C-alpha cells in the first residue's frame, strides 16, 4: 500500500511538473542595427545623422504554448532610435544654411509565431528557433512632422540558452526583423515612394534572452 501511495505521488508530481512546462514566456533586450543602404550624395554631417538612426535599443517578448518541441504563440518586438544633427537647408533668400534637427524613430512588430526548441530534452544546453509573420509599423518624428506606415513583416531568431533551473533559462539570441514600406503618411498626407526610394525597415539584433517556463 505504501509503495502504491509513493508511486501515485510520484506520478502526480510528474503530471504537475509536465503541466508547468506547457507555457514559455521569452523576453529579450539588446541592440539592433538597421541594414538599409544610406542614400548617396549626403554630406558627412548628414551621414552621421542618418547613422544615428540605424542603431538603437531592441526589445521583444513572445509567449508560446508548447507541444513537445513545437511552440505556438505570439510575438511583439520594438526598436527605438534617435539622432541629433544638422541637415542642409536654405534661408528665405536662398542662402544655404545648416539646420539643427532631432529625429525619433520607432519600429514595432506583432504577429503569430512558431518556435522549435529542445526545451523538453534532458540537457541544460538549450537551443531554439522562432519565426513570425505579422504587421510591422514605423513611426518617425522630426520637429512637428510625423510619419507613419505599416506593412507585412517577418521576425525570426535563433538562440542558445543555459538552464539555470527547470523553469528559467538564459542566453544570447541573434534575430532579424524585416519589412519595407512603399508609402507613408506625413501629418495625414499619404506619400507614395518610388521603387528605389522605399523605406527599408530591416534590422538585425543581438540580445540577451530569458525563458520562463510554467
Image (cartoon, rainbow, N blue to C red):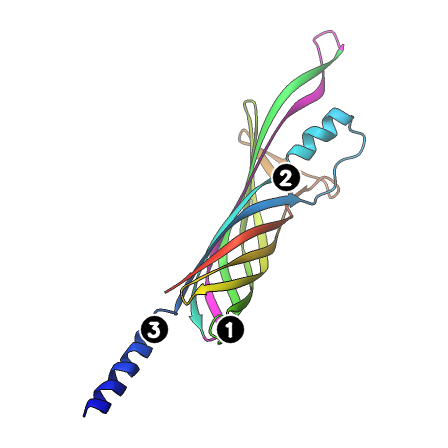
**Which mark is first along the chain, 1 or 3?**
3
Asked which secondary structure carries label 2, the reply is strand
Q: Which residue is mark 1?
A: 123
Mark closer to the observer (1, 2)? 1
Q: Which residue is mark 3?
A: 17
**Can residue 167 be seen in the rendering of this structure?**
yes
Q: What separation in Å lies between label 1 and label 2 (alpha carbons)?
A: 36 Å
**Which mark is first along the chain, 2 or 1?**
2
Q: Which mark is residue 55?
A: 2
Dominant SS of magenta comes to strand
Q: Quadrant of residue 199?
A: top right
Q: Which residue is depicted at the point 52% across and 66% down?
A: 115
Compared to residue 135, the image places residue 2 above or below, namely: below
Callout 3: few (<14), some (14-19), or many (20+) C-alpha neighbours within 10 Å?
some
Asked which secondary structure carries label 3, the reply is helix
Q: What is the quadrant of the N terminus in the image?
A: bottom left
- Does the magenta portion include 94? yes
Callout 2: few (<14), some (14-19), or many (20+) C-alpha neighbours within 10 Å?
many
Query: In the displayed structure, does residue 14 sit left or right of residue 123?
Result: left
Q: How many numbered marks have been drawn onto this rendered protein structure? A: 3
Q: Pinpoint residue 140: horizontal percent, then vertical percent.
A: 57, 33
Asked which secondary structure carries label 1, the reply is loop
Q: Which residue is depicted at the point 61% across and 49% down?
A: 205
Residue lying furthest bottom = 1
Residue lying furthest left = 1
Q: Are marks 3 and 1 in contact (CB under 8 Å)?
A: no
Q: What is the quadrant of the C terminus in the image?
A: bottom left
Compared to residue 183, the image places residue 67 above or below, namely: below
**Can residue 181 be seen in the rendering of this structure?**
no
Q: Nearer the viewer, residue 24 or 196?
A: 24
The magenta-colored residue range is 68-95
Amino acid at each position: 500500500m505504501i509503495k502504491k501511495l509513493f508511486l501515485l505521488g510520484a506520478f502526480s508530481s510528474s503530471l504537475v511538473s509536465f503541466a508547468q512546462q506547457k507555457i514559455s514566456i521569452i523576453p529579450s533586450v539588446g541592440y539592433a542595427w538597421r541594414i538599409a543602404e544610406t542614400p548617396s550624395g549626403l554630406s558627412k554631417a548628414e551621414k552621421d545623422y542618418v547613422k544615428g538612426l540605424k542603431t538603437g535599443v531592441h526589445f521583444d517578448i513572445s509567449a508560446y504554448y508548447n507541444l513537445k518541441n513545437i511552440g505556438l504563440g505570439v510575438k511583439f518586438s520594438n526598436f527605438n532610435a534617435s539622432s541629433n544633427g544638422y541637415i542642409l537647408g536654405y534661408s528665405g533668400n536662398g542662402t544655404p544654411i545648416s539646420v539643427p534637427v532631432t529625429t525619433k524613430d520607432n519600429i514595432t512588430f506583432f504577429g503569430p509565431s512558431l518556435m522549435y526548441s529542445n526545451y523538453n530534452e534532458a540537457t541544460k544546453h538549450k537551443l531554439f528557433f522562432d519565426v513570425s509573420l505579422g504587421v510591422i509599423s514605423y513611426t518617425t518624428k522630426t520637429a512637428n512632422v510625423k510619419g507613419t506606415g505599416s506593412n507585412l513583416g517577418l521576425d525570426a531568431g535563433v538562440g542558445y540558452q543555459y538552464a539555470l533551473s527547470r523553469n528559467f533559462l538564459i542566453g544570447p539570441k541573434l534575430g532579424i526583423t524585416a519589412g519595407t514600406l512603399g508609402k507613408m503618411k506625413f501629418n495625414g498626407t499619404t506619400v507614395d515612394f518610388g521603387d528605389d526610394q522605399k523605406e527599408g525597415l530591416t534590422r538585425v539584433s543581438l540580445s540577451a534572452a530569458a525563458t520562463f517556463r510554467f
